[in-house]
Image (cartoon, rainbow, N blue to C red):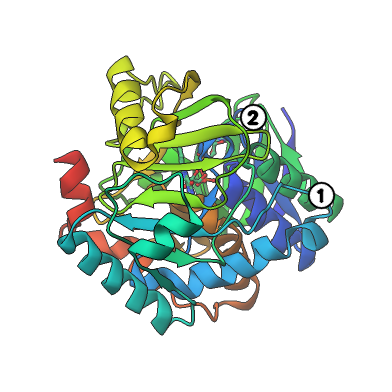
Amino acid sequence: MSRASTDVAIVGGGLIGAWTAFFLARRGQKVTLIEKGVVGAQSSGVNFGNLRLQGRFPGQYPLSLRSQELWEDFEALIGEDCEFEQTGHLYLAYDEDERTKLESYAQVSESYGLSIERVGLTDLRRRWPWLGERAIAATYSARDATANPRLATPAVARAAARQGADIRENTRVTAVENAGSGFILTLADGDLLSCGALVNCAGAWALEIAERFGETAPLFPAGPPQFVTEPFPYRIGPSVQAIDGSVIFRQIPRGNIILAGYPRTAADPQANRAPVPPVKTLAAMKALARVAPMLAQCHVIRVWSGIEAYLPDMIPVIGPSETTPGLFHAFGFCGHGFQIGPGVGLCLSEMIVDGATQTPLGPFSIGRFRSGPTVSDKFRKEFD
Ligand SMILES: Cc1cc2nc3c(=O)[nH]c(=O)nc-3n(C[C@H](O)[C@H](O)[C@H](O)COP(=O)(O)OP(=O)(O)OC[C@H]3O[C@@H](n4cnc5c(N)ncnc54)[C@H](O)[C@@H]3O)c2cc1C
């Protein structure tokens, strides 16, 4: 058994942990990131790869836009390519209620400085002729993008290591306790690690850490089912999403269509499984064919999901603990943490080094659950 010490210990080597380690190490902090498996193997490595700006929770725009700047600068910042591509994102409406919803999303996005194009019927057919006849309107955001999740998190962790961070894979944190003004972590091999600050970004496992300090959240695991088809000649530019939430898809340059179908599937963090029942594949393909009839006959060649932490208001917990000085939480990203990951890491590093961040994070405090959770419409539609 050995005993080591570090300024900041980070539990969880997903995208959030990796970016946090990178920014802290860049600020000269001694950082140890502990990951029970390998870096980026959970949600952060299996997601759809969408860096969507349209239609976000309004209070998240400052964080989301800060994150997009970091994605846009990924190669210069991290020194590796993650297949970041500014593909744009097309939201489709199929009836008047959906058109109204599109318009309200667009107005919120514009109030934060995004440029949203309203696309009428004629332009819709001219610009994206593979769309079916039934969509009546769309909005298009050119700044929305995609990246390859399999590449991103390991690249960020390698960049953090080059800045001096100690990245420990295949090492589970089995216990955490307060010790004076800091913490002592017990690792699965019996080693002890003491630290001044502790960051809990353990994804769907985050309550194992939070509850040791008397804090909790109504978190539960689930995963959006993902599918990939055989390759088609490349012609679909943007990510395409039906605003009713039934399907989102994009085509990678090799030609395959990646699609996500809803509602989400059950996930089991203890067994480390998120199986996708066959009925979900059929439903997703039906939803895909409604949007792009030419894809109706294509074959799905692989199906998967991931273990993601959800909260009933469909927004994450990001910020300091309300019981324990020096402890910070960032979990429960509800299916949209890939896009905001860089900004979350940057904000956490600012909170730890400077004592505050310029980005407003009030809506994401862990304390919001004390008076009972708010249940969002999106959550009711999918999970009730
Ligand atoms: C199928 C799918 C599709 C998605 N699509 C998108 C998308 O298109 N766009 C988007 O923005 N978001 C998307 N998301 C959401 C996004 O992937 C997640 O919000 C994000 O990756 C969360 O990152 P994380 O670092 O919090 O969690 P994770 O990636 O789950 O990382 C947490 C890590 O903590 C480790 N850990 C847990 N407990 C311990 C412990 N005790 N000791 C050591 N290590 C521990 C775990 O092994 C894990 O690696 C999707 C998610 C899924 C599952």
- Which mark is nearer the camera, 2 or 1? 1
Task: Name the element at disc 2.
Answer: loop
> Assess mark 2: CB under 8 A from ligand 1?
yes
Can residue 320 be seen from the camera position used here? Answer: no
Q: Amino acid at mark 2?
A: Thr
* 335 vs 34, nearest the viewer: 335
Which percent across, then down, holds residue 355? Answer: 57, 77
Q: Residue 13 lies in what quarter of the image?
A: top right
| Number of callouts | 2
- Residue with the mark numbered 1: 80
Q: What numbered label is drawn on residue 171?
A: 2
Q: Look at the numbered disc 1 and give the secondary structure of its residue.
A: loop
Can residue 304 be seen here? yes
- Please state the horizontal and vertical placement of residue 181, each as a whole percent of the image: 56, 62
Residue visible at 51% across and 77% down? 359
Badge 1: residue crowd in 10 Å (few <14, some 14–19, many ≥20): some
- Callout 1 amino acid: Glu
The mark that comes first in sequence, 2 or 1, is 1
